[in-house]
Image (cartoon, grey):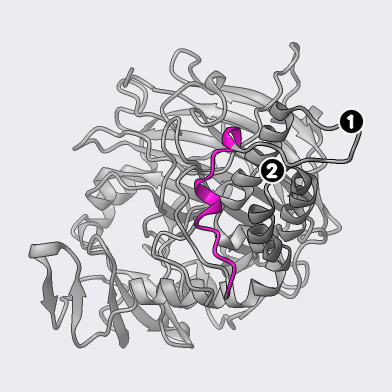
Amino acid sequence: MPSKTLEVTTSEGDIDQVATLAKPQAETPQPIASPLAVPMIIGEGCDLSGLLSFDPESIEPAHSTVRDEPSPSVTADQLQCLKALLSSPIETLVENSEEVKNTLEETQPHVPVTLQLKLWPVVMLSAFRSRVQLARQRIDSRHTHLPLEQATVAGGKDARTTTQWENTSPFLMDRQTNKTIVMEGEDIYDCIDVNLQPALSQPLLKDHKIQMEPSSFPIGLNVKPLLRQVISQAHMSILECPAGMVPILRNRRRDQISSKKIDIMINKDKQQEEAGIKYYADLYGVRATINVYEPKVKKGSNDASQTAIQIDNGPRGHVDSICVGYSVSPSAHGDNFARFHAGWRNGKLNKTCFDHDCPGFVQISHNVGLGGRVQPVSVYNGPQYVINILIFKDPKTNNWWLSYGEDNTPIGYWPSSLFNSINNKGKFSFWGGYVSGPTASSDSPQIGSGHFASEGYGKASFMRNIQIVDENSKLVTPNEYKGRYGISDTRKYSVDGYKVNKYGIHMYYGGPGNLV
């Protein structure tokens, strides 16, 4: 059982299973694009706002000289596919411009000339890639970047201004804060010198020299699945600390909890349940696309629900572990939001940590806030959102790196000196969700969407494109004979919809727990 832890001008709402199985597996339904598209402008003279409101069934095919002209229903399906593509986030559009172009060429003979003229500039989408990236950076910065001297906290008539925040974190008391950033929801981040971050007070990292970037990334990282439909990316807490600084969450609620109680909450005699895939092999990394939900955990509960990818190694009772994903934990944060966490465990010391709550993880990113909210989150039978996560071992330094997003942006790493068994390689991995805490079995929270895996796309949580890094630092599809379903209680949770292709493993997981 796995160890559990833990400027293109755009508006503010930009358009935006590896198991040895005895029975045949159902095909995984293909994801569809988010229907929540809003008007947007791409560059100059390419206004898609009119296009995105058209009804394919209402368009009569233009006259065609081709003998075998598609039927109106086929044409409508093609147009609906084009609409779905163009309703995807702008960042995804420019990355998949070739697919948009091909779909456009298929549908062009069957749409009115006026619509053809509107669609023509879409073939130039790739030219806007750099401008879109710059626009996204500016938007994120504008939403989250607040000055230290006068940080405004949003909240309508309750908005207030603060000139100073009391710093109670034991890891930040003796460190100079360059800037304080207050996020929506009153998460507070301190910008700390990268060379003074909490990780460097870890005795296991004595005389550690910070590695500012990986020596290399896994081979095959740039190979992306060609999808007929796309799913929107959820965003982590993105903020702008100055260069040479890293953001550290000042969680006042956790500061008020004694270290002894935290240790009890994380490690001691807790109940736990799980739903996912267990995989046994030599591992040098794992990558996955994770569907983001906010599973229900009862208010006032000390339980937590988490979805993650995990790598372990070590003898029973002394397992080293790395675990990355999102969780809902009211007792840790005082809310029921999905928050992004990076956790690790030293099996010999029997010590579990996550984010910067205790020293160990070395952050190099100046704009990713560990412990912050992941948003937007998926809606049952509605829009779906995902995050892309990659954990991999640096072949030169043996440090374990964490990166995120479609561009695999590095966040930081766990130095190999933190571990005893996993410093060379992992031997076990878990992909899925689990709940843990004093009542996680007797009064189980939800996992994932809170619905059983058999409900499929848009209703059940999924992980897709799960790949592993082999001994040659190459991303490969896992061996389907080395995996097993890991379901602790089939009355509460399930795993289904498993399939394997050249892009990895795909599966659904989750369930209502006792919250039926």
> Can you tell which quarter of the image residue 284 is in?
bottom right
Per the image, label 1 sits on a secondary structure element best described as loop
Q: Name which residue lies at 60% across and 38% down.
A: 463
Amino acid type shown at disc 1: Asp
Residue 348 makes an appearance in the image? no
Circle on res. 244: none
> Residue 184 appears at what percent x and percent y?
27, 63
Q: Name which residue lies at 61% across and 81% down.
A: 212
> Can you tell which quarter of the image residue 479 is in?
top right
Residue 73 makes an appearance in the image? yes
In the picture provided, is 20 more to the left or to the right than 118? right
Residue behind mark 1: 68
Q: Is residue 168 magenta?
A: no
Give the Cα distance between marks 1 and 2. 41 Å
Q: Which residues are magenta?
A: 45-58
> Residue 214 appears at what percent x and percent y?
69, 73
Per the image, label 2 sits on a secondary structure element best described as strand
Counting every numbered tag in the picture gives 2
Instruction: In this rendered view, identify the residue nearer to me: 56 or 477.
Output: 56
Instruction: In this rendered view, identify the residue nearer to me: 486 or 184.
Output: 184
Mark 1 or 2: the one toward you = 1
> Residue 487 appears at what percent x and percent y?
55, 22
Amino acid type shown at disc 2: Ile
> Residue 108 appears at what percent x and percent y?
75, 49
Circle on res. 466: 2
Q: Is residue 48 magenta?
A: yes
In this view, 302 is above or below 286: above
In the picture provided, is 126 more to the left or to the right than 241? right
In this view, 114 is above or below 434: below
In the picture provided, is 490 more to the left or to the right than 153? right
